[in-house]
Amino acid sequence: MIKICKVTKTYPNGTTALRDVNIHIKKGEFVFFVGASGAGKSTLAKLLLREELPTKGEILVNGVDIVKLKRRQLPFYRRGIGVVFQDFRLLPEKTVYENVAFAMRVVEEPRREILRQVPAVLHLVGLSHKSRMKPSQLSGGEQQRVALARAIVNNPPLLLADEPTGNLDPDTAWEIVRLLVEINRRGTTVIMGTHAREIVDTMKKRVVALEGGRVVRDDQRGAYGCEEAKAPFVLPEVGEPSGL
Amino acid sequence: MIKICKVTKTYPNGTTALRDVNIHIKKGEFVFFVGASGAGKSTLAKLLLREELPTKGEILVNGVDIVKLKRRQLPFYRRGIGVVFQDFRLLPEKTVYENVAFAMRVVEEPRREILRQVPAVLHLVGLSHKSRMKPSQLSGGEQQRVALARAIVNNPPLLLADEPTGNLDPDTAWEIVRLLVEINRRGTTVIMGTHAREIVDTMKKRVVALEGGRVVRDDQRGAYGCEEAKAPFVLPEVGEPSGL
Amino acid sequence: MRISTWEFYIREALLSLRRNGLMSLASVSTVALTFLILGLFVLLVFNLDHVAGTLESQVEVAAYLDPDLEDGAHLEIAKLIKEIPGVKESVFVSQGEALDRLRVQFGDRQDLLDSVEDMNPLRHSFEVKAKRPEDVKVIAAEIARLEGVADVKYRQELVERLFNLTRSIRIAGLAVVVLLILATIFLISNTIRLTVFARRKEIGIMKLVGATDWFIRWPFILEGIMLGFLGTLVSIQILNRFYYWFADSVYSSLPFVPVVSPADTLRQLTLFLFGLGLLVGAFGSLVSLRRFLRV
Amino acid sequence: MRISTWEFYIREALLSLRRNGLMSLASVSTVALTFLILGLFVLLVFNLDHVAGTLESQVEVAAYLDPDLEDGAHLEIAKLIKEIPGVKESVFVSQGEALDRLRVQFGDRQDLLDSVEDMNPLRHSFEVKAKRPEDVKVIAAEIARLEGVADVKYRQELVERLFNLTRSIRIAGLAVVVLLILATIFLISNTIRLTVFARRKEIGIMKLVGATDWFIRWPFILEGIMLGFLGTLVSIQILNRFYYWFADSVYSSLPFVPVVSPADTLRQLTLFLFGLGLLVGAFGSLVSLRRFLRV
Ligand SMILES: Nc1ncnc2c1ncn2[C@@H]1O[C@H](COP(=O)(O)OP(=O)(O)OP(=O)(O)O)[C@@H](O)[C@H]1O
Ligand SMILES: Nc1ncnc2c1ncn2[C@@H]1O[C@H](COP(=O)(O)OP(=O)(O)OP(=O)(O)O)[C@@H](O)[C@H]1O
Ligand SMILES: [Mg+2]
Ligand SMILES: [Mg+2]
């Protein structure tokens, strides 16, 4: 379904976020992207959504080179992708309900469908009781779940979720992952960038690890780190000299 | 240092985020606030910063009732608090350097101090090489670290960190926690809202757990969950019926 | 396109008007204020033009008749003059009337005329008014060719001055109005651009969620039209009240000053301002959006 | 307050001007455009007032002397008239000159005067101009009391009409200018309000980081002043060029139309517009900030 071939992305300010990246993702896969802060996970999502253009290389989605998409075709391409942005990107002036409904209005779903689907999705992410509120009236985790609801409401064939559990407590996070797994089972390809070691290790799904913009690992049933079990963190000694 | 007495916070739209909360925090403590999404952690931080006023109850900081602070006094009170906001709140038009320097300009530090301190703090959070960039040119985790740098640059006596590791990979997250521990050792009171179970469990610091706006637990050397070790998550069965 | 989509556009536009209270207010009041100034100047120019027209229509050609013409022959001549194209009206002035007028002109130096009283040297004449000052020359020539007319006079210099004056008034008035229209358009679209600018992030988000450019544009366009409509409404109301009051007070206190009658003028002005308001609103939104749709 | 803080304010203001290019441009061009219109009308009103003043100074009192006065006695009278307060100038018109003038007035009806040639019934007279039309009555009375003056005449009605006309022009002009000033202030502060609105989030963040209200305000105020300054500069440049060109072309093509000399007028106008521009810029920012500082 997705073929990322020799993609390099250098931002106008000179930062190279991705270097010579090759990734093939088949329809129906569930892929984790992991990597340190600044490794290039969000950049990859932005390229797939064609929010940014690659500096070099090709990106084929369903056989179409999305770099060559015309401005006119862009909205229609994007409608096939549900996205949870790392910074949510909710419409600040719309209520939770309207934010989710917006994704359906864009594709001109009949009103009947909207009235049926939006409350159902909000119920799934546990926000039925907040549907009349504005994003600014929600907690961080609630906003994140609204973003997820908007991403899945149209049942898109591809779901890009950039740290969809970053602002969630472990229990809620697991519920969300459960939801993603469920959606994936129904045929949606799910790409999830994440830092949640526990989730990645438990799920035993494909893991692509990025480091400084390069793919350094691509395991079919992988874990967050290289070693299966990492040594636990040790607190610094009292009085240890520090750089501050 | 901080006495939160019978505080209730009901937002204008009717949501009650905190109910009859009583917490005392001594100078130099390191306190985790944990709780599900929407439990009231950020609301508590907003109250302490006097971004919001409590509906009922008193908040004493260093013996001063901050509810009764005059508009004129507010900036001076806030200068004693370093804050990492859950949504970062960086100034979008300023560079990383300027964002951090801003906190020092506000208190009219001499230029010499600014030139010395800002690069040092940026080095601490590992962003020396990004100091000339705007927030929009940073990854999520990088933005979060800028927010932290700004919070600590003035060595405030109180540090409020609302999920300061939510967008960070485990390694970077631990480095940040290490930094917070170091700052705490030098006498700064640290209050950290977090969902990072691993960190809370490892640190063995005071943990205040919120649930639906109430304090449900307050342990001196606590863990994230109630039970010391929680049963690992089990994936849903294939084909299990779901609500979608 | 579904009807429910159009409903959505309209609802969005209305909601946005209310939500962005400050910005809407700024736009509406900018439209209202600039249109008020524009409208006042259009009315001023209309009136100056009207005054100029009144002046123009008072340019006269004096046609002196043969002194030995039979009594009553002037009736025939009057008919011929009326048939000349461009003639607005002609008035017969008899010898006696001419002398009376001279007397009035002389004021307290009547003694000067006492000597000529008995042997009145003045002749019968026609005073002919042209419709437009540029026709005067031709008309004078036509009249001169008529039988029984001895001499034709008109004040060449005065006619030309008047012609120049009215033309300058018209050109200057038109120039000012055109400049004001351009300034108005500029100020209004400046304001709209700022309101769109304040919402550029939202526009970007919509595009990333799969909205087409037109899906994003329509609510903005409708909002722009509504802003233009509301602003025009306010200015038209004020202009109407003011102009009726103004025309009334001029009619009653300075009846000799010609004022353009309100009803017609205001109807035209209303149509013009509404057209301009809606267009500027719609196009202002459209143009302002362009930059932010490139996502 | 540290000097480096002021440096910071100024640097911030300058940076912000450049960063918010679109918004700065909108503000500057709004100031420039509204000031241009305002300036043009101030110049127009100045000139109308000047024309009115010129008309006023042409009101005349005619003083006819005793017909049997000795030759040369009029020199004494001339001196006395000049001493009357409010008199601008007085010109002696001899019997002969009066007749010549009448001849010119009669144009092609000279024959009327031939009979009176030898026994010229006209008298010597003075034509006296007053500085202000409202003084004419008093001056006329004063002159009438002089020895050797037989009769004093002035056109009461004309004087009063002129007086009314110039007063109306002044009042209307002042009213229009005041209205335009208010509209200008409103439009400019509307624009500034929108630019501040677009940055309300930043203002909130600054407050939460411990900035005092004045720490936030100063850069905005300085920015407002700079916006006002730039806008005024542009409008002043255009006004200067335009007015010199206009005055020149009027001088050379219509020398009889009195035009206010550019240098003085423009100096005053420049000062006024700069004052207004800086004030509106500073206060516009200050007032617009108020709402968003309540965090
Ligand atoms: N718009 C931009 N302009 C310039 N550089 C950018 C831009 N966006 C991201 N970068 C840089 O590109 C690199 C990769 O960023 P990216 O957002 O892809 O990281 P990430 O893996 O998502 O990190 P995180 O886990 O912190 O979100 C970083 O060094 C970042 O500073
Ligand atoms: N400005 C607001 N207006 C109305 N309700 C609000 C507002 N801010 C927060 N709330 C509500 O108050 C409750 C507590 O929110 P808070 O942000 O304190 O949660 P939190 O513990 O920080 O959650 P998270 O872990 O998701 O960030 C939530 O139900 C939220 O919807
Ligand atoms: Mg990212
Ligand atoms: Mg929170």
Image (tube, coloured by chain):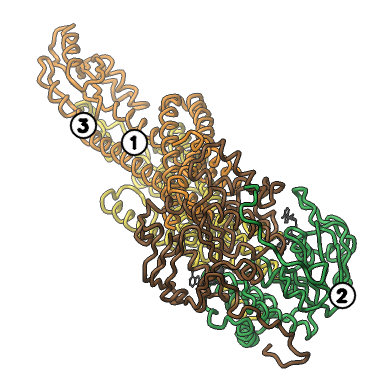
Chain colours: A brown, B green, C orange, D yellow
Total numbered badges shown on the rendered structure: 3
Which of the two marks, 2 or 1, is nearer to us in this view?
2
Task: Write down the chain letter for disc 1.
Answer: D
Task: Write down the chain letter for disc 2.
Answer: B
Task: Write down the chain letter for disc 3.
Answer: C
Residue at 74% over, 58% down: B38
The one nearer the camera, A230 or B222, is A230
Q: CA distance from mark 2 to mark 1?
A: 122 Å
Question: Tag 3, which secondary structure?
Answer: helix
User: Which kind of residue does numbered mark 1 sit on?
Assistant: Arg
Q: Name the side, left or right, on which A154 lies relative to B44.
A: left
Mark seen at residue C134: 3
Q: Name the side, left or right, on which D51 lies relative to A191.
A: left
Name the spot of residue B14 as percent of width and height, x first: 78, 48
- Quadrant of ligand 3: it is bottom right
Name the spot of residue B124 as percent of width and height, x first: 64, 84
Where the N terminus of chain B falls, by quadrant? bottom right
Residue under circle 1?
A: D123
Q: Name the side, left or right, on which D183 lies relative to D292.
A: left
Residue under circle 2?
A: B220
Work out whether disc 3 and disc 2 sit on a shared chain. no
Q: CA distance from mark 3 to mark 2?
A: 104 Å
Name the spot of residue C73 as percent of width and height, x first: 16, 8
User: Which kind of residue does numbered mark 2 sit on?
Assistant: Gln
Q: Is residue D269 above or below residue C263?
A: below
Question: Tag 2, which secondary structure?
Answer: loop
Dot 3, crowdedness within 10 Å: few (<14), some or many (≥20)?
some
